[in-house]
Each structure stands twice: as C-alpha cells, then as structure tokens.
Image (cartoon, rainbow, N blue to C red):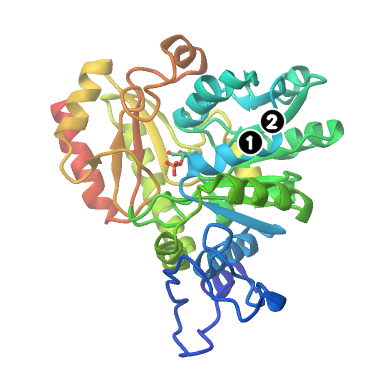
Amino acid sequence: MRFRTKQIHAGVTPDPTTGSILTPIHQSTTFVQSSIDDYMATGYSYSRSANPTVRAWEEKITVLEDGDDAAAFATGMAAINAVFLTFLNAGDHAVVSDVVYGGTYRLATTVFSRFGVEFSFINTADPDAVAAAVRDDTRLILTETPANPTLKYTDIAAVSEIANAHGIPHAVDNTFLTPYYQRPFELGADLSIHSTTKYLDGHNATVGGSVVSATAELHEQVAYIQNATGAIMSPQVAWLTLQGVKTLSERMDRQSDNALQIAQFLEAHPKVTSVQYPGLESFPQHDLATRQASGYGAMIWFEVVGGVTAGKRLMDALDLWALAENLGSVESLVTHPVTMTHADVDRAERARVGITDSMVRLSVGLEDVVDLIEDLSQALERA
Ligand SMILES: Cc1ncc(COP(=O)(O)O)c(C=O)c1O
C-alpha cells in the first residue's frame, strides 16, 4: 500500500460486532476476562497497559513510519520523557540537538539533570561535532530536525551512522515533517518521536505523543516505561488522531504550498529583513532539506525592520493569524518563540543557537493563501 492509502486504512478494521467503519472509542478502564486460565485472551486487561482504540493509533503510526511498533503517550513531552527514561540512567550522558523545542530543553536541564544525567547540546547539523561529543558514557543521541524554531536540519543518515558505530540509539523528533515527508528509519535512525498534537492530529483538537521504534527490542523497552510510568494517550485522543491523520498528506501538501508562497511574499517585502523557509533557495540548508525529505513543511520564521518592537506590533496587528502556541494545524498561527515556546531556554543559550528576540514564527495553515497574505500585508504596514 502507498502512503495515502495507509494513512486511511492502516491499523483499523471495521468493528467486528457492529460493522462500524470507525474504530470505536473504547472508553473502558478494564476488560473482563473469561477465566484466570485464559487471562488476557483478548489481549487487553487494563487501559493503562493497553486499550484497543489507542492500539489502533499505535498500529497506524507504526505502519506510516515503517517501524516495528509504537507506544502512544499523553503528550509529545511524555513521549520524549519516556525515551529519556528508557535509555538514560543516573550518571549517563546524552547528545541532544542544540536547537530543540523549549520543553525538551527544560526537561533535560531542569528535571533529568537532578538525577545526574548530563546533556551536551550540540550543533547536530555538523556530524563531526556529534562524533566529537560522543563519550564512553553516552547512551542516547536525540536530534530534532527540522528544529523548533530555527528550522535547522540534522543529516539523519550521518548522525545515525555515528550512533550505530557506537551502539547508541539515535532518536529523531520527526514532529515537523512527519513520516509523510521525512523517513527516519530509512536513514538509519532507531526511534522516531512525535508530538501528535501537531500535523498528525492537525486540527488543534488534542495533545498527544508517540514513540515509534525500529526494532521489537527497542519497542519492548519503551513500552515497559509507557506502562510503568502511565503517561498514556487516552482513547478519545487516539480516536481524534486516527481521524485527523487520514488527511495528513493532503493537509501537509497544501499547507507547504501555502508556506512557500508566503515565504516568497515575505522575501520580497521591504519591511522584512530576513525570512527562513527550507523551500527557499536562500535557506542555508536548502540542499539538505531537499535531499533528506520529500517536502519542506509549513513552518517559517522571519524578522522585520524595527526588530522586537515592530515584530510585536505586527503580531498584534494580525487578524486571521491567531497569536497562539502550537503548530501544524489547519488554523494558521503566529508565535513569538522567545516569550512563548522557548521562554524556558536561557537567554545566553538562545543567543548561542540563533533564537533571536525578534523572531516571528509562522505555522501556515490550510486557509486560502490569498487571505493569509493579505492579512500579513496589512499587519506589515502597521508594524
Ligand atoms: C518538535 C517538538 N517536539 C515535541 C513537542 C512537545 O509536544 P507536546 O506539546 O505535545 O508535549 C513540541 C511542542 O511544540 C515540538 O514542537
């Protein structure tokens, strides 16, 4: 089956008792057993350990990533937390991309650091820097590509080669491009992490996360932590995500197409001093973005004449674009990373990795691109 067919049919079959074409929401804590001797005959006992609706989502995302199996979580952060808990013990070291979602940075630097885990935030766009950062006690490499919010790309194949040579798992946060555009396992990665909150759901309806593993052995370890710590995806969220993902390819293609047109508009606008979109030839890693993924996604960032003050005026002046955290949904959103998604990354670190105070981040939605551009145009006039 091809991707567009899989996103609709994988992991789901009509309900055997009613014929319901949509997987039912199995809103049940427990599953009645026929006898002690036949315990778990249905495969289900208690919804923290496994739930049929959540399982349908896990099977679907596994097929979409071409992985071995997947574990679904309450949020993307719960998924990343589970990866840290699976592979890192007290005294271990991990290499993490220097540009990551602010919550990932916060989890590493303020929570796992309390347990003696050490993190090196490395420019993973440079494979030599990754190789140099690996130590005897390194137990995990986590890359986010493209990264939130600067859109820096990591060469997944090059970093996977380094990880494999050292026998360290390479986990890729694939939230921004999803398996529709970027295929970590074909490039040698071991785990693919998602905030399903973003493109996979795509409708601003849920928060959720998933970890897809390339092998049964890795999945078994992640699934153990999923059950032991209990930050599971709920059946309601799994059901909504199962519906949202059916149009993933159509949404992503149209949103990316909108994004390219908006990036070109911004690039030509006299009030815009810099615009970054992987699909623009001016994007510093345009070649890697083109080689590594089949699409450029729908995230853009830019800066305007007048810096922070003008950027804030612009964000306030937008009508159609909602000033809100989140990305990847059908509604277009504008975000100020420094006050919103990356507020917990300390100022010096932000400056070091290029997260500027004047950065305006756009998550381009599915609206008519003419309306989106008209709104940006009037706001730029008032910035
Ligand atoms: C790349 C990336 N990974 C992980 C997360 C965390 O996901 P969640 O908000 O679902 O916990 C986010 C959230 O913005 C993100 O952008």
Residue at position x 51%, y 52% from top?
Answer: 232
How far across and how far down the image is residue 143, in percent?
62, 33
Q: Which residue is mark 2?
A: 88
How far across and how far down the image is residue 139, in percent?
75, 29
How far across and how far down the image is residue 265, in percent?
32, 39
Outermost residue to the front: 36
Q: Secondary structure at mark 2?
A: loop
Q: Which mark is residue 85?
A: 1
Residue at position x 52%, y 62% from top?
Answer: 47
Q: Say few, some or many: other residues with alpha carbon within 10 Å of mark 2 (under 14 / 14 to 19 / 20 or more).
A: many
Q: Secondary structure at mark 1?
A: helix
Near-viewer residue (68 or 246): 68
Q: Is residue 183 visible?
A: no
**Quadrant occupied by the C terminus:** top left
Near-viewer residue (290 or 102): 102
In the rendered view, would you say 125 is above or below 187? above
Residue at position x 45%, y 72% from top?
Answer: 26
Three-letter amino acid code at disc 1?
Answer: Leu
**Quadrant occupied by the N terminus:** bottom right
How far across and how far down the image is residue 178, in percent?
54, 51
